[in-house]
Image (cartoon, grey):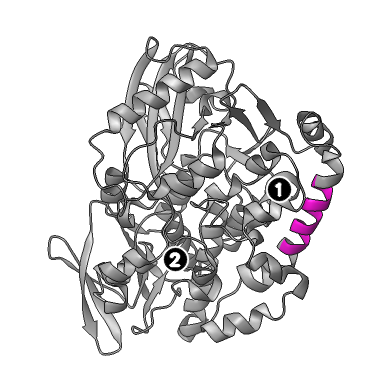
Amino acid sequence: MKRKALVIGAGLGGLATGLRLSTRGYEVTILEKHSQAGGRLNQIEQDGFTFDMGPSFFSMSYEFDELFNYCGLDNPLVYEELNPLYVVNFSNGRTYKIYKELGKLAEEFKKVEPDFEKKVIKYLDDAGKLFHDTEGLVVKKNFNSKLDYLLTLTKVPWKHSPKMFRSMWNELGRYFESRDAKVIFSLVAFFLGSTPFDTPAVYKLLNYTELKHDGYWNIKGGMYKIVEALLSELEKRGVSIHYNTEITGFNQNGTGVKGFIDKNGKVWEADLFISNSDAASFRGNVLKRDRYNTDRLDEMDWTLSPFTIYLGVKGKLDNLYHHNYLLGENFEEYASKIFKMSISPDKPYYYVNVSSKSNPDSAPEGCENIFILCPVPDLRYKKDWSDKETLADNIISDLSNRTDFDIKKNLITKRIVDPVEWENTFNLYRGSGLGMAHGLNQIGGFRPRNKDEEFKNLYYVGASTVPGTGLPIVTISSKLVTERILQDDKSVQ
C-alpha cells in the first residue's frame, strides 16, 4: 500500500515536493488556504491584463531542469533570457543598463568608475569562487544539528570567512569607488528581502549568478507557467489539491502527528506531513510551540514587506524595460532607516516590471501591464495601511514624471496589495515578503530545520527553512526535504 503524504501549502515548495514524492511512489494530497495554487508565485487577471503577482524573474535556471529531470519529465518551460538584466534609474536622471557582457557593462560605468571592467572581473572572480566552494557543501545539504552545520563550514576555504562578518555594502567598497556602482550591485540584497547594510557579504555570490553564472530569466507566457506546469503533472499523477482550506490545529499520536485540522473542523490524516507554510510561524501559530510564540517570533529578523501595485495602461512605455529599479539619491539613509519606520516613505525607492515587454499576451494590444513593488516596513513597525492610496499615488506620479508618460490619464485598471493583504492571503508572518531574513544567526543550520524537532513524521519546505529564499533555492529546498523523508522512510526505497 502506498504511503500517504499530506502537503500543507501549494506554493512552489509544496508543489515541487508533492511532485518529487509522487515520483517516489507516495500518494500525495495538497491543501491550500488560497483559492489558487502558487503562493507568492501567483498571478492576477483583471480587465484583460495578466500580472505576475510576486516573482517576476529567476536565476539558476538549471534547478528547474533538475526538478523535472528528477521526476522523469522533460522540462516544459520555455526560458527567455533577459539582457539587459535590468535598468537602474536614479532620480537625477542617471540611468544604467546592466548587461551580462562585461565590455558593454563597463561602457555604462566609464564616467563614474575608472578601470571598471578590471574591478568587476576581480569582484566576480572572488564571488564565483565563493559560490562554487559553497553550493554543494552548504547550500545543497541537509544539516542534522547546528554542530553539524558549523563543522561543515570548517570545510569551506578559510579565505571566505571574513565575508561572513562584513556587510554587502562594505564588501563592495573594497572593489568599487563610485557610489552608483556600490548601490547598483548591492541591490541583490533586496532579493533576499533585506538591505545591503544588514546582509552578509557572502551573498555577493548573487552578483556572480546574475552577471556571469546563469543570468536572469523569464518564462515565456509569464511566470505562472511554472505553477501551471507543476499542476498539470500533479493532476496526471492523481494528486488532489483542496483549495480554501486553512490549517488551524493538529492531533498528536505519540511522537508523531496523526492529522491536521482545518478551520472547518475537518481532520486530514496521513502517514507523513510537509508544511509549505512559514517554517517558524507554523511552529508557533499551529503547533503552539513556546519557542516560536508571538513575542519570540517578533524578536527574529524578518524580510521586508511588499507593497505592490498592478496597473494596466493604454499606450507603450518606451522608457521602461522588462525589469527596472527607480532609486533616489539618499540610498544609505533610506535603506538604513525606512524599513523600521511607522510611516510611508515620501520619496520611495521601488522596482517596476513590465512583463508585456517580454510577454505581449499579458496585455491587450497597444497596452502595457505594470507591476510595481515598493519594499516597506513589516507589520511590526507599520500596522496601519489606511494610507495605501496616498503611497500608491505618490509612486505612480513619480513613475509618470520619470518616464514622461501620464499613467493616470491612460489608466485602464489598478489594484493595490498592501502588507496586510499579503499576510492574510498567504499567511506571511507580519506581512514579511520572503519569510525569515538571512543574517548570520538565521542561515544554514541556524534556520528552522526541514524536519520537526518533536514530531518524527512532520517536515518543512520553503523560504523560511533551508536553504533560504528565492525560486531556485526553494526548488532546492524541495529536493532536500524529499531526501530527508526518503532517508527516514526506508519502506519506499
Looking at the magenta stretch, what is its main secondary structure?
helix
Placement of the N terminus among the 4 image quadrants = bottom left
Percent x, y for residue 77? 58, 43
- Residue at 42% across / 44% down in the picture? 338
Above or below, 403 against 103 in this view is above
Q: Mark 1 points at which residue?
A: 214
Res. 2 in view? no
Q: What stretch is highlighted in magenta?
A: 120-130
Q: At x 69% / y 33%, what residue is drawn?
A: 83
Whether the magenta-drawn stretch holds residue 226 is answered as: no
Q: Residue at x 57, y 24 (%)?
A: 357
Question: Which residue type does callout 2 highlight?
Answer: Val
* Image height of 359 relative to 451, above or below: above
**At 47% from the left edge and 77% from the top edge, which residue is drawn?**
485
Helix, strand or loop under label 2: loop
Mark 1 falls on what kind of element? loop
**Picture quadrant where residue 314 is located:** top left
Amino acid type, residue under disc 1 in the picture: Asp
Of 116 and 437, nearer the camera is 116
Taking the image as shown, residue 158 lies to the left or right of residue 147, namely right
- Res 253 visible: yes
From this view, report whether residue 390 is shown above or below residue 189: above
Q: Which comes before the other along the chain, label 2 or label 1?
A: 1
In the displayed structure image, the side of residue 448 where residue 294 appears, left or right? left
Q: Distance between the residues labelled 2 and 1?
A: 24 Å
